[in-house]
Image (cartoon, helix red, strand yellow):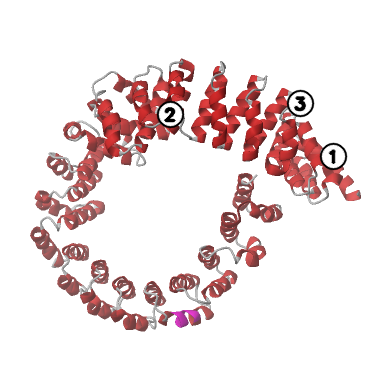
Amino acid sequence: MEKIELLAEQLRSADEETRRLAVVGLSGHPAGKTKDILFTALGDVSWRVRKEAVDALLAAEIPAEIIEEFVLLLESDNAGLRNSAVETLERLGVRAMPVLRRHVTDDDHDVRKFVIDILGSIGDAEAVPLLVNALDDPDPNVCAAAAENLGRIGDVQAVPHLLQALRKNDIWLRYTILESLSKIGKPVPMAIITPLVGENLLKKAAFDCLGAIGDAEAAPLLIEGIRERVKNIREAAVAALMKVRERLPEAVAKQLVDEKLMALNGSPSVEGLLSSLDTADRGLKEALLKLLGIIGDERAIGRLLQCFSDDRLRKYCLPAFKAMGEKAATSLIRLFAETDEEERSFIAYICGELSFPGSEQVLRDGMRDASPLLRKVSVKAAGRAGLSGLVQEIAPLLDDAAPEVRKGAVEALSRLAAEDGDAVLKIAGRLASAELPEKRCNSAILFASLGDTDKLSLLIKDDDAVVRKTAVNSLAALKKESSVGQLVMALADEEADVRIAAAGALGEIGGAAVLEPLLLAMKDEDPWVKCAARKSLGKLGHEGARQEIVELLATGVDGLVTISALQTLSGIGGEGIPELVKKALAHPDEEVVKAAIDILSRQGDGWLDEFREDLLAHPHWDVRRSFIKVLAAERGADAVPYLRSVLDSEKDDLVREQILDIMDRYR
């Protein structure tokens, strides 16, 4: 008792950290002995102290009479104490249900509301009848809380009762019920929702509800909602309509939705829709982009182009431009000469992705522009659009001053090889005899696009190692068994980088003919050639690599080689592999330990308890962080006690923050 009294004294300290540590010290003692002290801490001015008090109480066995006292705390004037009591009851979950059940009808309406909110957070379906009864509570706030928390629980058995309560003449209650019906997601008769659309204060909630549960019958009502003058109601109709459309068969969607939306082309409603594109709500913005594409109004083209600067929105802008077809092509081509460099680059990109008719001149101009960015985008777009007529204009860009433009030109010509192989072959031939190694490397890439293994075989013998390596990688991309002989020769190249590429290429091609050369490459003097050979044998699942790798691991090689060996073993699989990987958890290189953790995490959680204490106390912070992430992913809330036990001794701020985030997640 002396220790508890000392800790109680420390709780009266003016220092926040002293009070927090006092609460930590009380953790683990029987709740009956520490309850009064911890209840005081639940109302502390510091949220950190209150949090520790909640954790300490939950770490003990809490009898029903103490749970009852938590409910009594809900009447307190101390907001921090009330919040702590709410949090504790929520985290007690179903253990608190018998006590909460008795207080759903408490004399104090504020307590009734707290209890109903707690039941909703617990989310147990057994609370549904209690909340259904509370829909008739004399206090309107309690009624609304009951409706809201029935939505949080999401049990369909609540739907008939919510529909019954929807008849009450209480706007806020009806609004809340509509939101809950949206969350539950069970379809209800349209005849119940339709009249509510006529009430201005309920329109938004009604549209939101139709977005969640509506079908084809809801489409006309939502299309009409798009004409609404009030912005938030109009936006709710847009979001709901696009959700309903996604649930409809495509043929039905085109008939019931798209044809009606196309009728809005040229109407004043489009201006309102365009103004809503300024929203910060990404879901709404995506819905607006889809809808504007269907409507096809030219006024949207400029705004769609502006949205294109956000790469997360491009996947919605492109279909919109595509849906507008020739109209979008004409406008974008006209805008190309009038706008800035960034938007010209976007237009060139769009022309390449959608192969707009008439875009050839835009891309030709773009390839001649002073901006390296625009030249790069334009030449790549010409390749994607399959514009073989531009091959001779692409060729000069192979000598461009900007490396990214030269790279884009090679990519474009590679794509166009299927369209005009003869022209690309001539360009590749000229490059193959060029003095600059970069040009010969580019020729290897072009020969690969033409499938010309004979020319690539010649480049494998080039004087420049980078060219030889590029030729090897190009042969690997073709994956032709006829290339195995040339690649085996490359395994004897004087440059290790070429041998590494050859070993990797043989793994890509596969087949029985590559096994013996790869096994020989395992004896190469360069450790990275050995790594490449091991990876290829692992990819092919060849047992011949296993023993050599096991012996390699026993020699204590450097970290990167060890990581490569572990990954190869994981690819080969078989008995004994997990035990070898576990041994790597004691490796002095933290990167090796992290790699071992990653490999083991893909094989279940049977190893966690065996190594938990060692890894939570590992000297390197990033290892601790990696293990904590895996522990939380595998064990969820069950990981919290272990994390709490190391929190006070953890010195690294990033790791502490990670632990606190996980503990909050499972609070």
- How far apart in space, not on screen, are marks 1 and 3 (Cα)? 18 Å
Q: Amino acid at mark 1?
A: Asp
Q: Where is mark 3, residue-wise?
A: 77
Q: Quadrant of residue 502?
A: bottom left
Magenta residues (range): 546-550
Instruction: Name the outermost residue toward the right.
Output: 2
The disc, 1 or 2, on the residue closer to the chain's N-terminal end is: 1
Q: Where is mark 1, residue-wise?
A: 36
Residues under numbered marks 1 and 3 in contact, where contact means CB atoms less than 8 Å apart: no
The nearer-to-camera label among 2 and 3 is 2
Mark 2 closeness class: few <14, some 14–19, many ≥20 residues within 10 Å: many
The residue at 45%/23% (across/down) is 193
The nearer-to-camera label among 1 and 2 is 2
Element under disc 3: loop
- How far apart in space, not on screen, are marks 1 and 2 (Cα)? 51 Å
Give the x, y percent position of residue 471: 23, 69
Q: Foreground residue, 636 or 97?
A: 97
